[in-house]
Every structure is written in structure tokens, then in C-alpha cells.
Image (cartoon, rainbow, N blue to C red):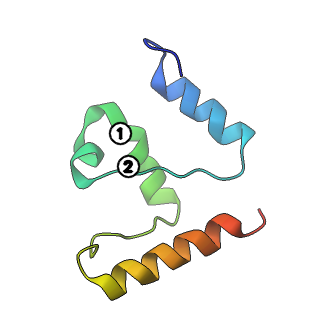
Amino acid sequence: MRIGGEIRPRIDESIRLHYKLLLVLSQSPLASIWVKWAADIHRMRHIGDFRQWKDHDEYQKAFERLLRDLQAAP
């Protein structure tokens, strides 16, 4: 995306063109008006949960599911 480009239209276009989207957000951006659309996506789609990232086993399970889901056919 070019500097100064509008974020929302570009992401919307990318979602329409591609069947997979990997969006990485922390809790703070979800509360920001700049990424309000991310909160909408969070409510409508399955979102991988990496909140337990400090727990090796929980992180490993979440990461393996992410990899499996990214490799799955649409």
C-alpha cells in the first residue's frame, strides 16, 4: 500500500480479491477508532487466540491451528 493511501478501502479490496486474510492485532488497536473494522471482523469471523502466548503449549496449539487453517482450501 502506498504512503498516504486509504487503509479501509485497500483492506476491503484485498479481502474481496483473496480468500485468506491474516490480520495481526493486539488488544489496544481493537479499541481504536482507526481499526474499528477489525472489531467488526472479530465479531463475524473465527479469530485465532494468542492471548496465552507466554504459555508454550497454548501458543503451540494456537500456532498449529493457524498454520492448518491457512493451508486449508477455501
Amino acid type assigned to the residue bearing label 2 in the image: Ala
Q: Position of residue 25 (x, y in %)?
A: 35, 50
List the single residue furthest toward the right.
Answer: 73
* Viewer-closest of 74 and 1: 1
List the single residue furthest toward the front.
Answer: 56
Q: Position of residue 49 (x, y in %)?
A: 38, 70
* Viewer-closest of 31 and 73: 73
- Say whether residue 15 is left or right of residue 5: right
For residue 29, above or below residue 5: below
Name the element at disc 2. Answer: helix
Local crowd size for mark 2, using a 10 Å CA cut-off: few (<14), some (14–19), many (≥20)? some
- Say whether residue 5 is left or right of residue 57: right
Q: What residue is pinned by disc 2?
A: 39
Q: What residue is pinned by disc 1?
A: 36
Amino acid type assigned to the residue bearing label 1 in the image: Lys
Local crowd size for mark 1, using a 10 Å CA cut-off: few (<14), some (14–19), many (≥20)? some
Q: Which mark is residue 17?
A: none
For residue 24, above or below residue 12: below
Determine which quarter of the picture holds residue 36: top left
Q: Residue at x 66, y 53 (%)?
A: 20
Image quadrant in which the C terminus is located? bottom right
Name the element at disc 1. Answer: helix
Distance from disc 2 to disc 1, alpha carbons, whole Å, reads 5 Å
* Viewer-closest of 35 and 43: 35
Q: Are marks 2 and 1 in contact (CB under 8 Å)?
A: yes
Q: Residue at x 47, y 73 (%)?
A: 63
Q: Position of residue 21 (x, y in %)?
A: 59, 50
